[in-house]
Image: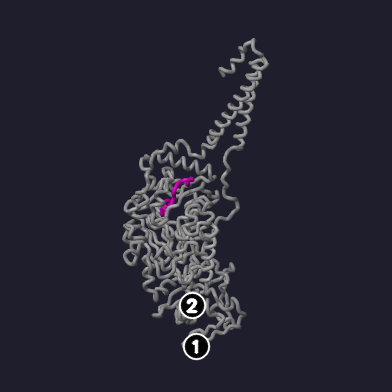
Amino acid sequence: MKPEAKISTVLTILGVAFLGLAGLFLLDTFSGKEIEGPKPGKVYFSEVFTNVATVRQSVGELEETGGDMSGLDCYACHDRFGEEIKLKQNEEGELIVSKEHQGLVFARMNCEACHKSGEVELKFDEDFFVIIPEEHQGPAMQHGSKGRNDNCFICHVRGNLPFLKTPKGEELPPEKGTQLCASCHGPIYQDWEAGSHGRASGYWKEEMGKKERKACTACHDPHRPMFPEMMPAPPPNPVNTSSHADGDTKPEGKNKTGGDNETDGEKETDGEKEKEEQKP
Amino acid sequence: MSESTNPSNPSPSRSGGSSDRMDRRSFLRKSTVAASGLAALAASLSPLRKLEDYGSLEEFMQKHYKELSAEEMDQVLKRIEREVERQYDVRPHVQDLKPMDGVEFVYALNLSHCIGCRKCVYACMAENNQSRDPEIQYIRVLEMPNGTTDLEQGDHRYDPETVPRKGHYYMPIQCQQCENPPCVKACPCRATWQEADGITVIDYDWCIGCRYCEAACPYWARRFNFKEPHLPKDQVNPNMHYLGNRPRKKGVVEKCHFCIQRTRAGKYPACVEVCPTGVRKFGNILDPESEVSYILRNKRVFVLKEAVGTMPRFFYYFD
């Protein structure tokens, strides 16, 4: 074989090898393992936890925003078997609301939402407190811890339940529920007015936009004003957490004595058991 | 190559065949060495194919945030918009809102009414484009037994069926936006500083990831991107701020910045907005009419780890 031929063969081999390697690199054969991206479709957290809505909607709010008022019927207040209610309609079939009902919001809950009509008979004790049957005690009426405030007519106008009445006898339309609350809960109302109690959303700088305040009944059910219990959003996920995944909640001593991961794990489960035991 | 030319003048006196074989062997040897050398060279250069991931030359040559002129800032914001669009298929609106005159932000939190629902934690994640996997959260809610404010007794992994649990109160902790911030002092490259409105910010392009600030913070407020952050494309919040919620890279520190992209536009931070009980209060302390001014005047407020001398702008109170 001639030397020139040898040189050319070697150069060809080298060239082919280089091209081959270059091709392999282009195909990512030698690059590091790809980091796994977020899995499509995996729910990282529920949108429930970022929802800005308040825990409840007051009737006043429903009125203002034109919310769903279905299910509120006349018989919440009127006696179903008493005088017949005659609805007046205009030529287009729309309901004409009588003068005394204008601006009035129908009570949402009435016994007949669950009970057959006529089945329910309200019983009052000597002081006109509604006697609540045992099965309805608990969630239904819990304004005040000792049940001293469970008389309907402390806050509602007798004979016209949707209208409200302050202890001084001042009658208020249902949208002015905040004033009714203020008539007893003065200091909290003061805090609410100043902005330290209750929710605020929108703009902190009023020149740049509107600051929205919520009325009392947007968060508190007047019949059961304690803020309802809620399901908490999931705790920080130690598997997903990169920084300070462990070690933060564990006291240092544990890590020092433990050493092995296994022992650490055991201790953690012990802690969980303790927690479970603490639960009532 | 000089040696390879030698065989072209072989001495005819010696046996030509043997010298040929020798030469072939040496050629093979050399070619193997050369091939492996080339392979090594190519392998060492192969990361260059992913040069894009290491940031552009523009980013590398960028000046410090405080030295950027308005025009240069515009260029930088456009570059970030381009990069975000390429990575997340979302056209973001990256801003650089400056602090307002006569504004100093203060936060107040009513511990009597916090129920520990952790909504603030997740609203914050949704607003601020934190990494979902690994999970980075700015707010940590501690479940504290009644009768103590000893943080060591708090548990941030509580997970009961419903909250609040009896005999406990809840204490959310996030960046306290100190007036005397130890993290700023610890930073060796001035990548974090305090702005005129009291927000301590981080320039993610300037951070070298030494984590000194994280160690200096007494409130466990700073988080480090150990891995490449992962944020689903459909969960990107396109309203961004240079010093706030623009997507971060691996190897930089981040923390709560009072939702700078919202608060400097006059809005409430996301955590205030979402809190169902309304215990989170935010506003301008220099405005005597603001709700935080009212709280500081009328409530008994306290700060965490007062003895450390950090002078937090984050106040807790009971009422």
Q: Residues within 10 Å of mark 1 (few under 14, many from 20)?
A: few
Q: Earlier in the sequence, mark 1 or mark 2?
A: 1
For numbered disc 2, what is the local secondary structure?
A: loop
Q: Which residues are magenta?
A: B248-261
Q: Please state which amino acid type lies under the numbered disc 1.
A: Asp
Compared across the picture, whether B223 is left or right of B15 comes to left
Q: Quadrant of the C terminus of chain B?
A: bottom left
How far apart marks 1 and 2 lie (CA) works out to 18 Å
Chain containing mark 2: A
Identify residue for label 2.
A142
Residues B230 and A273: in front is: A273
Q: Which residue is mark 1?
A: A125
Q: Is residue B84 visible?
A: yes
For the residue pair A221 and B105, the one nearer the viewer reads as B105
In the image, A89: left or right of B129? right
* Image position, residue A121 (x, y; %): 57, 85
Query: In which quadrant of the rendered view does residue B189 lie?
Result: top left
Q: Residue at x 57, y 19 (%)?
A: B1
Residue A76: quarter of image:
bottom right
Mainly helix, strand or loop, the magenta region? Answer: loop
Q: Which residue lies most toward the front here? A: B14
Q: Can residue A212 be seen in the rendering of this structure? A: no
Say which quarter of the image contains residue B47. Answer: top right
* Mark 2 Cα-neighbour bin, 10 Å: few <14, some 14–19, many ≥20: some
Q: Chain of mark 1?
A: A
Residue B290 magenta-highlighted: no
